[in-house]
Image (tube, rainbow, N blue to C red):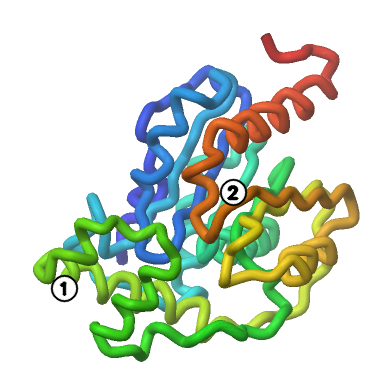
Amino acid sequence: MIDTPNWFLEHKRNPSALFRFFCFHHSGGGASAYFPWIEQLSPHIELIAIQLPGRENRFTEPLINNINDITAYLTEGFCYYIDKPFFVFGHSLGALLSFEFIKAIHERYAVFPLHMIVSATKAPHLPFRVKRLSQLDNSSLKEELKIYNGIDERILQNDELLDLFLPIIRSDFSICENYRYAASKPFPFDILALSGTNDPTVTEEELLGWSAYTTEKFEPVFFPGGHFFIKEHQKSILEMFNQIGENHYSLTGKPLV
């Protein structure tokens, strides 16, 4: 069995933090995408980046494209983190994984996050409508990846790097392509849904579909840009995350400073 703590990367530990912030990466990505965020987050927030196997520090481990297996490992590993309130963020594939993660940890530990933030993906119950990329040949897949405008050009132009990268992204794409939604009750916490106005993978209607998953406040926010708008608007987005933390802590009567 894979050691479950490896799924949760603490790039800079912050034992005095009031909240934890679990971040799920996009298809083909890795936990390191979120490490630059740490310096811009409130000191009251500890960032924990989820790392799927087969990439970065887990490159030698076999890829996993079964969402139930992924959720099972994450749920088991979460036992180390149930002592503090937390938020959850996921971009693209990461949003889908975070959704299943939240359901699983509530079933096992009877806990919910304080807030859920989803980015660049449709609501889980809506049909999969975009092209199935996991079955494309290398040349076709490379051309499709250019549309996303988030893949490092150095990878796309280097055949050796591409040979290492394509199996990872195929595996990740297949998670979304083979996902089967199981009905669930709305969550008792706020959901913030983010999207790029020119994202070819998700429509405004599909993003607004996340409103069905909360009995509390739902807030959609649209930024200029495509699928990886979070890179262009990182500062503004992290300010939103910090404000979420401040709002939750201020409910105790002790505003963050």
Single out the residue that lies furthest toward the left. Answer: 160
Marking on residue 89? 2
Image height check: is 157 above or below 248?
A: below
195 to the left or right of 215: left
Residue situated in front as seen by the camera: 182 or 245: 245
218 to the left or right of 93: right
Q: In the picture, residue 84 is in which quadrant?
A: top right
- Per the image, label 1 sits on a secondary structure element best described as helix
Residue under the point 72% across and 78% down: 125
237 to the left or right of 192: left
185 to the left or right of 156: right
Residue situated in front as seen by the camera: 245 or 243: 243
Single out the residue that lies furthest toward the top. Answer: 257
- Per the image, label 2 sits on a secondary structure element best described as strand
How far is the residue under mark 2 from the one under mark 1?
A: 29 Å
Residue under the point 50% across and 42% down: 232
Residue 77, percent from left and from top: 46, 52
Residue under the point 72% across and 80% down: 126
Residue under the point 29% across and 76% down: 142
Q: Which residue is mark 1?
A: 163
Look at the image and tell me whether residue 111 can be seen: no
Q: Amino acid at mark 2?
A: Phe
Residue 15, percent from left and from top: 48, 22
